[in-house]
Image: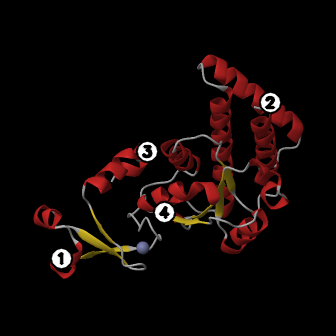
Amino acid sequence: MKRVRRAYENLFRGLLEGLGARRVEQGVQRLFAQAASLAQRESLSLTRALVRVNEELWRKRRRMQRRSAGAPADELPPRLFLCDGGLGGLARWLRAAGHRAVWLASVSDKELLEQAVEEQATVLTTDSTLLERRLVRDGQVPLLWLPPLLKLEEQLALVVEHFALRAGEPRCMDCGGELRAVAKETVRDRIPPRTYRWLDDYYLCDHCDRLFWRGSHWRNIRRRLPTQLTDR
Ligand SMILES: [Zn+2]
């Protein structure tokens, strides 16, 4: 809990600074008190309550950013997510939900943050020490720290809520490329005969040429996505 607490202290500090708060340390204490009372009120673990308080703070910050950018939410350019080594599964699911996500299996913290600056990307990480990096604390690199031990679905739900993501057209889970529909006759030799008989919709990845179809695997994935993502 001590590490989690420290991670949130850093996170809150950075967010409060970004919001222009004057008494940052007092603000951090107030947020912890809020989380504690929320935990008690709704019988949550303190970690869960901290997640919720943090989300609320992010929402506030997003509203502020939108106001200052003068653009409504849906005109903001789509986010690029950089997922660190432990989050390969999350990257795949974000793509299935139509988002741009890159999995960086083995880069140093420094490289990860530099790439995020260069590509104006958002970092997703389970490494709480990244919250202490200057680029993150200054708000130059938007970063969401995911508490360790979350299940894949919980990670995805957290990211979706945090950034208010909507479902887009599914992308290739392997590489994030765009999918385009193909006539099934042209890819017949790549489809199991039984599937070929009952299914008509097939998609090729523009980038890596992997073939997808909306069979049971596809439906399973979509079903397991948070509700915001399955509206369409
Ligand atoms: Zn692909």
Specify the quadrant that holds the C terminus.
bottom left
Q: Which residue is mark 2?
A: 30
Placement of 112 over or under 185, stated as above or below: above
Q: Hey, what amino acid is under mark 3?
A: Pro
Question: What x and y, as percent, mark residue 204?
Answer: 32, 75
Label 1 crowd bin: few (<14), some (14–19), many (20+), radius 10 Å: few
**What residue appears at the point 75 percent right and 48 percent down from the top-left corner?**
128
Query: In what element is the residue under mark 4?
Result: loop
Placement of 96 over or under 29, stated as above or below: below
Placement of 27 over or under 102, stated as above or below: above
Q: Which residue is mark 3?
A: 226
58 left or right of 90?
right
Q: Do the CB atoms of the residues marked 1 and 4 lie less than 8 Å apart?
A: no
Question: What x and y, as percent, mark residue 47?
Answer: 67, 32
The answer to which image quadrant residue 167 occupies is bottom left
Q: Hey, what amino acid is under mark 1?
A: Arg
Q: Do the CB atoms of the residues marked 1 and 3 lie less than 8 Å apart?
A: no
Gap in Å between the C-alphas at discs 4 and 3?
14 Å
Mark drawn on residue 188: 1
Q: Which residue is mark 4?
A: 99
Query: In what element is the residue under mark 1?
Result: helix
What's the image's color scheme? secondary structure
169 left or right of 140?
left
The answer to which image quadrant residue 218 occupies is bottom left
Q: Hey, what amino acid is under mark 4?
A: His
**What residue appears at the point 76 percent right and 62 percent down from the top-left corner?**
109
Query: Which numbered disc, 1 or 3, marks the residue closer to the eye?
Result: 1
Mark drawn on residue 6: none
Label 3 crowd bin: few (<14), some (14–19), many (20+), radius 10 Å: some
